[in-house]
C-alpha cells in the first residue's frame, strides 16, 4: 500500500483537546500554513505492539517547530501519552503512522513570517501497513537538496517536501520507485523519502550530515545497532559513483525502517547480508524493553 492509499484508511486526529475520526478540516484559506507553508511534522510508527523511538520523534517535532519560528505548545511526554491513548482506537492488527504537527494560523510582521503565538497542534494517527523488505529501485535525480541558507533544512518542515515530490515523480516517470537526491555540490544526500547507506568490501558508509538533510532517527538507531554488532559505519562524502560501485545499498527511514535497494540506474543488486542483518537488529531492538 502506498502512502497515498494510506490516506483512505482508518484515521483518528487529536486537535483542540478532542479526538475526531477521519480527515478533519483544520485549515482555512487564510491560514498562514495553507498560504505560505509554515508547518512542521514528525513521523513515528506503531507496529506489532511497539512504537520505537516515539519519544525522540515527539521531541523532534518540537525542535522543528522552533527552527521554523513556531511556538511548540506540547511537551514531549504529552505527545507520547496522547499517542498511546489514540492507538487504543485502532484494532491493533494494522501498523499505524504517527504524525504530530504544528502550523501557523496567522502571519506576523508584514504577514510573511509566522506569528508564533498563533501556532496550533494536532496529532494524526492512521493505518499504514509496513511495506515488505523486498527492495526498491532508485534513479539519480536532476533536482538537488537545498542548504540551510535557502530553506529550513534543520526542520522536518512541510515546505521542503514539494522538492522531494518532484524528484520522486521524475524518477517514477523513468521507471524507478524512488529518487537518489544529491546536494548542491553533487554529492549524495538521501533518497526522496529516506536516508541511504552503502556497503563496499564489508565497510558500511552513509553520507555525512552536511546541513542539507536530516540525520534521521532511524538512521542513527541503525548506525548504533550495527556498531554494537561489529559493523562500524563511516559517515563521509559519497558520490554517485560510490553507490554505482557498491556491493549493497539500503535505506533507513521511519515509514519503512530498513529496506534494501535493489536497483540504481541501470545496475541491479541483490538484497545483501548487511542490510538483512541491519533490519533484523532493528526489529530485535524494537521489540526489546530499551525501545519503549
Image: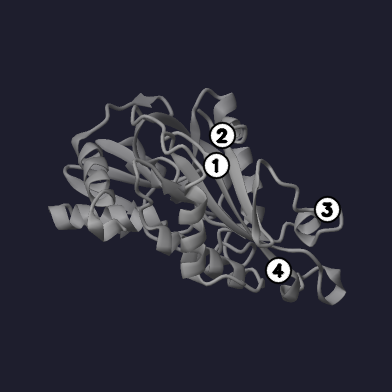
Disc 3 designates what residue?
A: 28
Disc 4 designates what residue?
A: 119
Dot in front, 1 or 4: 1
Q: Image quarter for residue 69?
A: bottom right
- The image shows a total of numbered marks equal to 4
- The first of marks 1 and 3 along the sequence is 3
Image point (46%, 62%), residue name: 80
Dot in front, 2 or 1: 1
User: How far apart are the alpha carbons under marks 1 and 4?
Assistant: 23 Å
Disc 1 designates what residue?
A: 126
Q: Nearer the viewer, residue 17 or 70?
A: 17
The secondary element bearing badge 1 is classed as strand
Residue 246, position in %: x, y? 28, 38
Q: Decide: is 99 above or below 8.
A: below
Image point (81%, 69%), residue name: 107
Q: Decide: is 159 above or below 250.
A: below
Dot in front, 1 or 3: 1
Amino acid at each position: 500500500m502506498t502512502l497515498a492509499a494510506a490516506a483512505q484508511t482508518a484515521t483518528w486526529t487529536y486537535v483542540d483537546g478532542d479526538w475526531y475520526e477521519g480527515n478533519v478540516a483544520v485549515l482555512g484559506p487564510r491560514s498562514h500554513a495553507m498560504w505560505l507553508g509554515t508547518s512542521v511534522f514528525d513521523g513515528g510508527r506503531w507496529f506489532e505492539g511497539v512504537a520505537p523511538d516515539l519519544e525522540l520523534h515527539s521531541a523532534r517535532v518540537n525542535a522543528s517547530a522552533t527552527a521554523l519560528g513556531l511556538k511548540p505548545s506540547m511537551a514531549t511526554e504529552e505527545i507520547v501519552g496522547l499517542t498511546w491513548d489514540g492507538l487504543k482506537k485502532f484494532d491493533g492488527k494494522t501498523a499505524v503512522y504517527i504524525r504530530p504537527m504544528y502550523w501557523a494560523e496567522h502571519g506576523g510582521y508584514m504577514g510573511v513570517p509566522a506569528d508564533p503565538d498563533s501556532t496550533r497542534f494536532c496529532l494524526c494517527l492512521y493505518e499504514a501497513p509496513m511495506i515488505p523488505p523486498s527492495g526498491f529501485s532508485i534513479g539519480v535525480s536532476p533536482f538537488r537538496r537545498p542548504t540551510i541558507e535557502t530553506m529550513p533544512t534543520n526542520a522536518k518542515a512541510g515546505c521542503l517536501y514539494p522538492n522531494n515530490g518532484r524528484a520522486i515523480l521524475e524518477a517514477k516517470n523513468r521507471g524507478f520507485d524512488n529518487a537518489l537526491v544529491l546536494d548542491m555540490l553533487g554529492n549524495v544526500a538521501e533518497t526522496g523519502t529516506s536516508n541511504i547507506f552503502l556497503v563496499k568490501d564489508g565497510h558500511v558508509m552513509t553520507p555525512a550530515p552536511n546541513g542539507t538533510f536530516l540525520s534521521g532517527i532511524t538512521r542513527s538507531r541503525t548506525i548504533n545497532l550495527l556498531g554494537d554488532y561489529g559493523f562500524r559505519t563511516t559517515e563521509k562524502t559519497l558520490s554517485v559513483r560510490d553507490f554505482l560501485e557498491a556491493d549493497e545499498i539500503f535505506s533507513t527511514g521511519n515509514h519503512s525502517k530498513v529496506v534494501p535497494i535493489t536497483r540504481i540506474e541501470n545496475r541491479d543488486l541483490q538484497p545483501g547480508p548487511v542490510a538483512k542483518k541491519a533490519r533484523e537488529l532493528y526489529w530485535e531492538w524494537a521489540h526489546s524493553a530499551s525501545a519503549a
